[in-house]
Image (cartoon, rainbow, N blue to C red):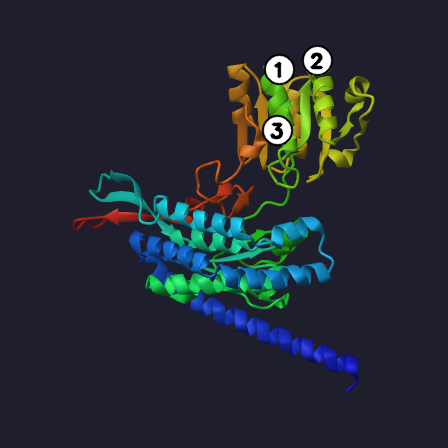
Amino acid sequence: MSSISATATNQDVDAENTIARVQEMGRAARAAARLMARADTGTKNRALKAIAEELDARRAELAAANAKDMQNGRDNGLDAALLDRLELNDARIDGMIEGLNQIAELPDPVGEISDLKYRPSGIQLGKMRVPLGVIGIIYESRPNVTIDAASLCLKSGNATILRGGSEALHSNGAIAACIASGLKKAGLPETAVQVVDTTDRAAVGALIAMPEYVDVIVPRGGKGLIERISREARVPVIKHLDGICHVYLDDRADPKKAFEIALNAKTHRYGVCNAMETLLVAEAVAAEFLPKLAAAYAEKGVELRGCDRTREILPQALEASEEDWATEYLAPVLSIRVVADMDAAMDHIAQYSSGHTESIVTEDYTRARRFLAEVDSSSVMVNASTRFADGFEYGLGAEIGISTDKIHARGPVGLEGLTSQKWIVFGDGQIRE
């Protein structure tokens, strides 16, 4: 056998072993999901607090594991931004502990009954909120996502299988040990949260193709990862591909609000999905608003790309291409278009938006209501920065991700988004005639 064919055979065996391992995790998760669905709120909260205590007690172990990942990252040429996302320092461990405690304080959605009403037959009909079952979560870089995802799934009564990025393998393993210990202390199955402990890419393929064991997949990562999962998954996916967010400055906008919102939406943080990527400005106020904004953007080092009318007002702006209107920069780059009015702004949004978040700045109540009703995105805002489209800001405690889908969950997905509803009927011996 040649060395090439021998290598191929070894890779095939490794892939088969990985697939078998993930399938076994799926079986264990399905069994654990039944136990989690009936766990009471007190037990789940005890588990969350026990995990927080484990994280605090094992700081040295977490630091040692993370140091291995950081060194491997430097050796493999990870850039400074990715290394920063990967680092697990004391402040970030504190943040993980705080997040666990916050989720423990949130209301438990499981078992909530709503819309109870009597039917003419005498039966009482309503809806009960229930866990989804087994949630597979695939993510990159940041090890704190392991805690965010595990805690949300735990509180919402789900079992979960987590597949973190290969660059955080040791950190995620150390966090997984804390989670398992906390679950055990609370009397919950350790298999309720499982972390895939291999870097083999076959693990992702297996996880997204097990509808008998996994009920939903949540990908958190780059566009390439999410496109692959959306294309290949045999399990429903909660996801968003792009965050092409818009702010429209209406001709009835308060100038001070317009300035502060447009500046914050772009420059508060660049590499996040809720940052503004395109600024739309009404023609009637463009000459007044844009020079002041351009000066502020210049101080922040933001590159401007504009339409013809924008460049007449701001000669320093580069020419915006058709591609620019459809680009999520995640960088200090901003596209600007001057539009005739709100209808033209909404037409632009309808054509280029990714359905994430849009905002209008206006003092006209009627226009604000129209914008809210007609713009079809997961978050639509009036006189507020797009940066508020976030689970913590929405009072969800944390989020599993952002969904731009229209079925089931939409926008920031917190505890309620990780549950579903089923019809329930209370009778007293009724039979259908």
Q: Which residue is mark 3?
A: 264
Q: Residue at x 29, y 48 (%)?
A: 424
Disc 1 marks a residue whose amino acid type is Pro
Q: Residue at x 79, y 30 (%)?
A: 320
Decide which of tag 1 and tag 2 comes sooner along the chain.
1
Q: Residue at x 61, y 40 (%)?
A: 273
Could you tell whether 335 is left or right of 312 in the image? left
Decide which of tag 3 and tag 1 comes sooner along the chain.
1
Q: Work out how far the residue at label 3 is from the one at label 1, CA to CA, in angstroms.
A: 14 Å
Q: Residues within 10 Å of mark 3 (few under 14, many from 20)?
A: some
Q: Secondary structure at mark 1?
A: helix
Could you tell whether 178 is left or right of 186 in the image? right
Disc 2 marks a residue whose amino acid type is Glu
Determine which quarter of the picture holds residue 75. bottom right
Outermost residue, left direction?
428
Q: Secondary structure at mark 3?
A: helix
**Rendered image: mark on residue 288:** 2
Q: Position of residue 227 (x, y in %)?
A: 65, 52
